Image: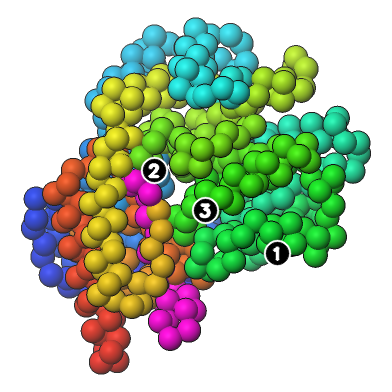
Amino acid sequence: MSAESLPVPRSVPRVETKFRRIVTDFPVPQSLPVLERLHRHEICAMRGQPPVVWDRAEGFQVYDAWGNMWLDWSSGVLITNAGHGRQQIVDAIVRQASHKLLTNYCFPSEIRAELCERLLSLLPEPLKRIFLLTTGSETVEFAIKLARTHGQKVGGRGKIVVVSFDNAFHGRTLGAQQAGGIPALKEWIGNLDPGFVQVPFPDGYWGEDTSFELFEATLAQKGIAPKQVCAVMLETYQGGTSAFAPLHYIQALRQWCDGHKALLIFDEVQAGFGRTGSMWGFEHYGVLPDLTTLGKGISGSLPISAIAGRPDLMDLHGPGSASSTHTGNPVCAAAALASVDLIVGEGLAANARAMGDILHDGLSSIQRRFPQAGFLAGKGLVAGLACVHPEHRQPDGQLAHDIVWRAVEKGLLMFAPVGPMGCTIKIAPPLTITADAVRDGCQALEESFGEILALRSTGSAIR
Ligand SMILES: Cc1ncc(COP(=O)(O)O)c(C=O)c1O
């Protein structure tokens, strides 16, 4: 949906597979009043997603109120790792709400104790202290606070530089945006803090040089001495591309951090809770962070997040100095406990690994057929397929957009493309997805590529 206008319904082919059903024009004409109300009342910065009006979501499918059913490859935004609308999560929420403890601020409650214990039982040493919050951005802010506090403690007032990566996304609050690596998102700040610097992310495609020497050389070029660095923070895989860094790079980074008394922070807000085929995304690197931030898939539903880390770091600030109005909200905590039980009990990380193999096979075959699908990255049930102009590898955000919209018209739900110039089609189904459903989605995506590129080649209107 453009920022200016409401979308106009158009006739689309009807679809009926085991996993997708489209029985109306799109957007659904009867949904226009809802779209219109949001358009009228909500900030325009919220626009940009395919105009599917969600009514109900269950398992790996999303339904509207007019008979359409989408195979969900969004998980909202990588939230519903345990599946949409799981009865166990619903029951836990209802049970806790009926018990009539709906909030508890920082006052002790048994359910908060239970969740802290449960999450820490799943995290490896040394990540043995935890702080529950509400959003991913808040956990990133707290990570920055701890990093700078620790830096100044071990290296004096100048040790406050947080190094992060080009194209990184860590949230939309002030510190998180400064740690982010997308210049357009920071223009509004006006007086960027020189204590946040970014270096190239070694994805091997947009950043071809994957040597660790580039990390050191970039810092030197930016005039940052290692002794000034209090932390290096990275998304375990970059959300904008789904790319992981090479193993050798992260292992060298861990050593560099140790050598310079800098913390290593993995932002696992997207990567955690089984998404990449292991419980934690950082397991793929064979190193441990000093701090890690968690969110999204933690509850599969209600807003809750967490930061976990080395106890000596997490306890740098004394009693009474950390709080948040909704920290460990009891209803959200109940949802998180139920969601974690499902992820562990149903082996959803292993399912993500197995289904991820099928997904990545299907996407590789799309990439072989269409040179415009330039860069494929990800692990387990997260993937990014970047659309480019194959002659010169420039991002083709319009192509990605048109393909996603066409896929949605076919009953395959994805959110709007992300990454460099919005050229990455991001794929992140609930971890409960089955092999047949993965294949059905790949089929719809492949058709979408074929149809949009055919229209382009004849100069026909796409919509
Ligand atoms: C890696 C990462 N960190 C932090 C955030 C911010 O989380 P939230 O939107 O819950 O504030 C996001 C959100 O997309 C994310 O992907």
**In the image, which residues are magenta?**
379-398
- Provide the secondary structure element on which disc 3 rests: loop
Q: How is the image coloured?
A: rainbow
Residue 221 magenta = no
Q: In this view of the protein, can residue 44 be seen by the observer?
A: no
Kind of residue sitting beneath label 3:
Pro
Q: Nearer the viewer, residue 363 or 269?
A: 363
Location of residue 134 in the rendering, given as x and y in whole percent from the top left corner: 55, 31
Kind of residue sitting beneath label 1:
Glu
Which image quarter: residue 278? top left
Please report whichever mark, 1 or 2, sits nearer to the chain's N-terminal start. Answer: 1
Q: Is residue 291 above or below residue 366?
A: above
Q: Residue furthest bottom?
A: 458
Kind of residue sitting beneath label 2:
Thr
**Which residue position holds label 3?**
246
Please report whichever mark, 3 or 2, sits nearer to the chain's N-terminal start. Answer: 3
Alpha carbon distance from label 1 to label 2: 32 Å
At label 3, counting other C-alpha atoms closer than 10 Å, the crowd grade (few under 14, some 14-19, many 20 or more) is some
Query: Mark on residue 276?
Result: 2
Please report whichever mark, 3 or 1, sits nearer to the chain's N-terminal start. Answer: 1
Location of residue 214 in the rendering, given as x and y in whole percent from the top left corner: 68, 62
Question: Is mark 3 in CB contact (under 8 Å) with mark 1?
Answer: no
Query: Mark on residue 187?
Result: 1
Residue at 61%, 60% in the rendered image? 211
Side (left or right) of 9 relative to 389: left
